[in-house]
Image (cartoon, rainbow, N blue to C red):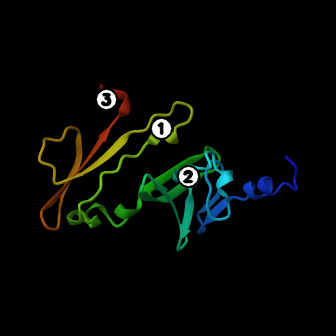
Amino acid sequence: MCDDDDQYTNCNNAFNCGSSITNIKYPFWGENRKKYCGGVSSDPNMELTCEESVPKITINDAKYRIHDWNDIIQKLTIARDDYWSGICAVNVSGNPKNRTFDSTMFQRDGVVSSQVNLLYNCDTSIPNVVFSTTCRGNIEVVYTISDPRSVSL
């Protein structure tokens, strides 16, 4: 690639949003980084946006805030945007959608992530409960963690 190649020049731009999240590049795209700069240009899950100086990524129709980015080890820390004000702030009366986060799309070098589950008003017994609370309106929220290495199918 040559220095005068527009795609090369465009992809050399980093995504920056706010004062703390800077220098995000491959495999992400968005804002000043064109789609072809991402790992898979047709993958909408790699698009980054900057909303009121808050960097966000939408994965499978769920919006996440980018909490931290470590450029050296390429580690992205995210949190569900709809839970940002707390787990009781979620509108459960509006029939909340189940969200499955496919962490394998971000796994590198065999690193295994744990699966976190937030369950609202469940009737069944829940294994591995880490945290339980009751929100306004007697809505019970249960927080569980499962290690994918220990799950047998």
Name the element at disc 3: loop
Q: Is residue 28 left or right of residue 65?
A: right
- Mark 2 neighbour density, 10 Å: few (under 14) some (14–19) many (20 or more): many
Name the element at disc 2: helix
The answer to whether residue 148 shows anywhere in this view is yes
Q: Nearer the viewer, residue 16 or 19?
A: 16
Q: Is residue 37 left or right of residue 100?
A: right
Residue linked to disc 2: 46
Q: Position of residue 46 (x, y in %)?
A: 56, 52
Query: As displayed, is residue 133 above or below residue 1?
Result: below
Residue linked to disc 3: 151
The quarter of the displayed image where residue 151 is located: top left
Q: Earlier in the sequence, mark 1 or mark 2?
A: 2
Q: Nearer the viewer's eye, disc 3 or disc 1?
A: 1
Residue linked to disc 1: 104
The answer to whether residue 25 shows anywhere in this view is no
The answer to the question of whether label 2 and label 3 lie on touching residues, with beta carbons closer than 8 A, is: no
The quarter of the displayed image where residue 96 is located: bottom left
Looking at the picture, which amino acid does disc 2 mark? Met
Looking at the picture, which amino acid does disc 1 mark? Thr
Work out which quarter of the rendered image holds the C terminus and state it: top left
Looking at the picture, which amino acid does disc 3 mark? Val
Q: Position of residue 77 (x, y in %)?
A: 49, 52
